[in-house]
Amino acid sequence: MKQIKTLMTENDIPRAWYNIQADLPVPLPPPLHPGTLKPIGPSDLAPLFPEALIAQEVSRERFIVIPEEVRDTYRLWRPTPLHRARRLEQALGTPARIYYKNESTSPSGSHKANTAVAQAYYNKMAGVRRLVTETGAGQWGSALALACKLFGLECAVFMVKVSFNQKPYRRLLMETFGSTVHASPSDQTASGRAILRSDPACTGSLGIAISEAVEMAAGSEDTKYSLGSVLNHVLLHQTVIGLEARQQFERLGEYPDILIGCVGGGSNFSGFVFPFMPERLNGSKQTRMIAVEPSACPTLTRGTYSYDFGDSVGLTPLIKMYTLGNKFMPAPIHAGGLRYHGAAPLLCLLRHEGLIEAVAVAQTKVFEAAILFAQSEGIIPAPESAHAIRVAVDEAIRCRETGEKKVIAFALSGHGHFDLAAYEAHLAGRLEDQDFNDAEAEQALISLPKTDAA
C-alpha cells in the first residue's frame, strides 16, 4: 500500500501504471505466431504496434511511469469520482454500502479514453500517421477517435454492423471527432469481403472487425493497429481506475469486500480490480472479485481455456484465454462491447487460478437493474456497465437477507446516452433474452488451433 501511495500526486492522478505481470502467481503463457505456432518476439508485433507499446506488453516492471503528456490529457477528466450509491442502497433496503467508480465522466463517455490517450501518444511519438481499430458498441471507437484528434493522428474504425445500425449516434460521435467509420464486415478489406460473400446478412462480431482492422493496418507503412481491450498494455493503462479507487477508499476509511465489473475483453474490469490484487495474492485481504458477462456470450463461465486467435480470420497471434472459439458468432444483444469470443490473457489466467469469479447474466435482468440504478442514482448506464450493476444489486440483496454490512464496489464503465434505443425496447417490453447456442459454440471449438504449448 505504501508503495502505491507514493505513485499518487496532489491532484490524485497516478504517476505510474500498475503492471500485474510483476506479481502473477504463475507465468503468463506466451502468445504464439499464427504461422509457426512458436512464441512470438517483439519483431513479430512491430508491423502493428510502436516499440514503446510492445515493450509494455512484455514488461515485468511493477510500475511503469505515465508520460507527462498523457497525464496532462488525463486532467481533462481525471481523477474520476467514487460515489456512494446511497439512494440505491435505500431502494434495496440493504445494510451493504455500495460504491461505484464513475468512468462515464470522460469526454468520450467511458473508461476507454484511459488507454486511447496513451496509445495515441506513443504512436505519435513513433511517427505514425494513422491508427486503425475495431469497436463493438462504439465506446472504444469514440475514445480513440478523440485521442487521435488530440494528438494529430488520422483514425479509421471498423464498427460491428449490428451496433453500427443500433447506435447511430456513436458513429456520429466518432465522425464528429474526425474519424472514418465502416460497418463491419465491410467491403474495405479482403477478410470483410470474404465474409460478406459467404453470409451477406452477417451482423458482424468483434472478431471480424479485428480481422479487418489488422489487415488494413498491416497493409500500410504509416498506419498502426490500436486495440481497446485484451492485450497486456491496454489493461496496464486502465489501472489508473483502481489506483485512484484505492486512495479514495483509504480516505473514506473503507476497503471493498466485493469488486465487480463487466467483461467483454476485460480492460475495464482489470483496470478496476488489478490494483487491489496484491493483497489478494499475499492473503492479507480476501476481497471477492466478480467478472460479469452476458449469458448470450459466456466466455469466462462456459468457454474453454485454450490457445485461440484473437480475431475471426486468424491474422492475430494466438493467445491463451477462455474462448468460445474464434468462429463463434454471438447473438446481437445490446451490450455490443461484451460480444467477444475471448478475453484478456491476464484476466483469464487469474480466473483459471481461482482468484477471480465469473457470472453470466441475461439482458432483461440487466436492464431491470439499469432502470433501478437510473431512477435511484440519476445516471443512465451503458448496457455493458449495467451487467456490473445487476450483480452489485444481487449481492446487496444477499446482504439484506443475511444482515451482512459488506462494502460492494463496481465499475461504472460508461454512460448509456447513446444506448437509449435499447432502453426504449426494454420499456416497451420488446427486449428479449438471447440464448447461448451450445451447438454453434461446440462447432466453433472444433476449429481451435492445435498447438504444442501447455
Image: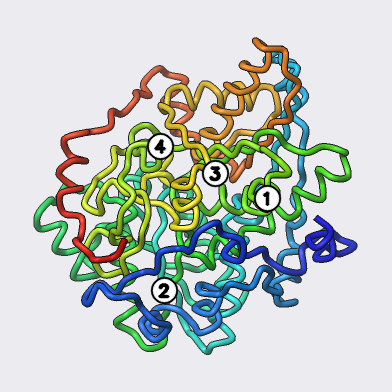
In contact (CB < 8 Å): disc 1 and disc 3 = no
Mark 1 lies on a secondary structure that is helix
Q: Name the N-terminal-most of marks 3 and 2.
A: 2
Mark 3 lies on a secondary structure that is loop
Label 4: few (<14), some (14–19) or many (≥20) C-alpha neighbours in 10 Å? many
Q: Which residue is mark 2?
A: 225
Q: Which mark is residue 355?
A: 3
Left or right of 331 on screen, residue 25: right
Q: Which residue is mark 1?
A: 282
Quadrant holding the C terminus = bottom left
Q: Which mark is residue 429?
A: none
Left or right of 447 on screen, residue 403: right
In contact (CB < 8 Å): disc 1 and disc 4 = no
Up the image or down, 407 lies above or below 9; here it is above
Residue 293 place in picture, x, y as percent:
44, 37
Residue lying at 58% horizontally and 79% vertically, measured from the top left: 122
Q: Name the N-terminal-most of marks 4 and 3.
A: 4
Q: How many marks?
A: 4
Badge 1 amino acid = Asn
Q: Which residue is mark 4?
A: 334
Q: Name the N-terminal-most of marks 1 and 3.
A: 1
Badge 2 amino acid = Tyr
Mark 4 lies on a secondary structure that is loop
From this viewpoint, is residue 237 visible?
no
Of the residues tagged 1 and 3, which is closer to the observer? 1
Quadrant holding the N terminus = bottom right
